[in-house]
């Protein structure tokens, strides 16, 4: 009987040991990992950031930005038309440079008419305004040179 009792004690101590091991591993699993499938997905999937502004406000800001770029584009186009007034001489075909420049400007604006990328639009506007200002600067320098030549009595 003592041997049977000893076997039961050994068996019960093994069961207790196994229960302790399984409870430790279960506790370790629960503390290291998520409890539910949603927590698992929430922890490991990329989260979509919530916008700080509503969709209506974002659309309003986008329209406002587009309106300002349209305004800038129209202003640049008017500046080009004003600047071309000073080009009164003709090219090799006998066409006024003013008309050639205006046609080219119109073509450039028509080509970029349906551009939606703000970065490209900004680059085009900056490039266009730089081109107009540099063309006017060169024109002013040439006119000063012509005036100086005329004052000195030289032929142009």
Image (cartoon, rainbow, N blue to C red):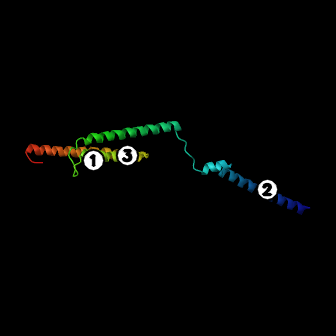
**Residue at point 41%, 38% (across, down):** 67
- Percent across and percent down for residue 114 are 42, 45
| Residue contact at pointers 3 and 1, CB within 8 angstroms | no
Foreground residue among 32 and 14:
32
Which residue position holds label 1?
A: 100
Q: Nearer the viewer, residue 42 or 59?
A: 59
Sequence-wise, which precedes: disc 1 or disc 2? 2
Instruction: Answer left or right for 58 relative to 81.
Output: right
| Direction from residue 70 to residue 90 in the image, left or right | left
What secondary structure is found at the residue carrying circle 2? helix
Q: Earlier in the sequence, mark 3 or mark 2?
A: 2
Q: Residue at x 38, y 48 (%)?
A: 111
How busy is the neighbourhood of tag 3: few (under 14 within 10 Å), some, or many (20 plus)? few
Give neighbour class at mark 2: few <14, some 14-19, many 20+ (Cα, 10 Å). Answer: few
Q: Return the residue found at the far left.
A: 153
Q: Which residue is mark 3?
A: 110
Q: Residue at (10%, 44%) from the top-left corner?
A: 150
Q: Residue 132: which quarter of the image?
A: top left
Please rate how many residues cluster around mark 1, counting C-alpha atoms within 10 Å: few if below 14, some from 14 to 19, many from 20. some
Return the x and y of residue 9 as percentages of the image width and height: 84, 58
Q: What is the quadrant of residue 102 in the picture?
A: top left
- Say the numbered circle drawn on residue 16: 2
Find the distance from the CA under tag 3 to the CA under tag 1: 15 Å
Residue 5, how many percent across, how many down?
88, 60
Q: Secondary structure at mark 1?
A: helix
Of marks 3 and 1, which one's residue comes earlier in the chain? 1
């Amino acid at each position: 009987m003592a041997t049977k009792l000893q076997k039961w004690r050994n068996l019960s101590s093994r069961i207790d040991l196994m229960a302790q091991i399984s409870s430790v591993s279960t506790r370790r699993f629960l503390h290291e990992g998520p409890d539910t499938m949603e927590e698992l997905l929430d922890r490991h999937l990329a989260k979509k950031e919530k916008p700080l502004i509503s969709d209506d406000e974002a659309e309003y800001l986008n329209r406002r930005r587009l309106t300002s770029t349209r305004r800038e584009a129209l202003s640049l186009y008017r500046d080009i038309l004003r600047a071309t007034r000073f080009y009164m001489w003709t090219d090799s075909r006998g066409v006024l440079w003013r008309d050639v420049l205006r046609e080219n400007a119109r073509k450039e604006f028509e080509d970029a008419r349906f551009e939606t990328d703000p970065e490209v639009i900004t680059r085009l506007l900056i490039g266009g305004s730089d081109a107009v200002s540099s063309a006017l600067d060169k024109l002013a320098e040439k006119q000063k040179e012509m005036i100086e030549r005329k004052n000195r009595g030289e032929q142009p």
